[in-house]
Image (cartoon, rainbow, N blue to C red):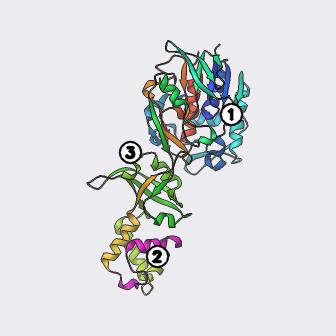
Amino acid sequence: MSKIAIIGGGPSGMMAAVAAGNNGHTIDLYESNEKLGKKLYITGKGRCNLTNACDIGDYFENIVHNHSFLYSALYSFTNESLMALMEENGVPLKVERGERVFPVTDKSNDVIKGFKSAINQKKCHFLLNEKIVDLVVEENSLKGIVLENGESRLYDAVILATGGKSYPSTGSDGNFFEVLEGVGHRITYPTPALVPMNTKEDWPRQLQGLALKNVTLTLVKKNPKGGVKVKSLMGEMLFTHFGVSGPLALSLSSYISASPKTYSLILDLKPGLTMEQMENRIQRDFEKYNNKDFINALGDLLPSKMIPIMVELSGIDPILKVNQITKIQRKKLIECFKHLEINIAGLRDFTEAIITSGGVDVKEVDPGTMESKKINNLYFAGEMLDVDALTGGFNIQIAASTGWLAGNAIE
């Protein structure tokens, strides 16, 4: 049996330890923090959205970059496999809206305990507060690792699961990508993903704290001819002191591949209504509030906090009587409901990103084993790879699946 080093104690590293341990290997699991799974503690607002219970085939629609690379990983260790592992290790689960899976206790710490329980049944030694700074590579074959104090340790194989650059305070600082570049791997430099957005307009900031549900948000890449639709999603968004956040904004941020300032968001406040239906609805409301001031006629259509903003954006005098609003003015109001543009000024930084986009070029990694095609006995797992997905538990599942595949592949 082999002696293996796993670098990183997040979900991918812990899952790799379980898989490698199943095959009888001796494992040293290195973690630069004082405890395992530090980033897991804050996922899902501390509740840990472990995975998604949708059909595994539907996962690929939720993977933003390099989804085909993950076929072997996701079908080898599925969401059902991960849920079964947790249940077997004392972590009962529940499925919520959007097929999101959480521990019944709503405590991320219980998920970490589940991973540790599974690992404790294997020949695994935890080495906490240990930072690895380099690799020992000879003739395109990995021989060991180098600790921060300069000490080298030899291993038969190494699995790198050090994460990307999101939430650097948890240890995901991305520094190991420089090491990999130094040994010949091509790296797509990580950028923030699943991250809130700053807006050019001030009005979103005036709505700070307002959450909108059942709206559609569309990301548009602007060009001289107007723009090209990139992605459209329906769900919930949140206005903040800097712009927009919430599931829709976070997910769409992952599709921004160039300067964020070349993109805009189109908000449809009433996606269930066509333009014609929206006009009929407004006409009914205007008949109901026929003698009211315009600003007092939108209460059935909008949250109260948003009414003054919508009045301003429509360009209609707030104290104009409803029965005096012209057809042209009504058309502009409908446009505001169905096609409200928000221009992006930039993305928030790595400290607010849930994950990062980028990492090790997947063309240089065997998708069936997660082994490097450049350096023998070197494996990758989780956010180190240039793969990322939308919110909803998909990213932790990817971490676990790639970790399992790497750990299981070592002979």
Observer able to see residue 59: no
Q: Which residue is mark 2?
A: 298
In this view of the protein, which residue sits in the foreground, 320 or 75? 320
The percent coordinates of residue 210 (x first, y second) are 54, 64
The percent coordinates of residue 391 (x first, y second) are 53, 46
Q: Is residue 246 above or below residue 313?
A: above
Q: Which residue is mark 3?
A: 258
Q: Residue at x 44, y 24 (%)?
A: 364
Q: Is residue 319 above or below residue 47?
A: below
Magenta-colored stretch includes residue 319? yes
Furthest toward the front, the residue is 149
Q: Earlier in the sequence, mark 2 or mark 3?
A: 3
Q: Earlier in the sequence, mark 1 or mark 2?
A: 1
Q: Is residue 202 above or below residue 359?
A: below
Q: Is residue 204 above or below residue 9?
A: below
For residue 210, the mark is none
Amino acid tagged 1? Phe
Magenta-colored stretch includes residue 229? no
Disc 1 on helix, strand or loop? helix
Q: Is disc 2 in contact with disc 3, using a CB cutoff of under 8 Å?
A: no
CA neighbours of label 1 inside 10 A, class few (<14), some (14 to 19), many (20+):
many
Amino acid tagged 3? Ala
The magenta region covers 300-325
The percent coordinates of residue 243 (x first, y second) are 49, 59
Q: CA distance from mark 1 to mark 2?
A: 51 Å
Instruction: Name the quarter where the C terminus is drawn.
Output: top right
For residue 115, the mark is 1
Furthest toward the left, the residue is 225
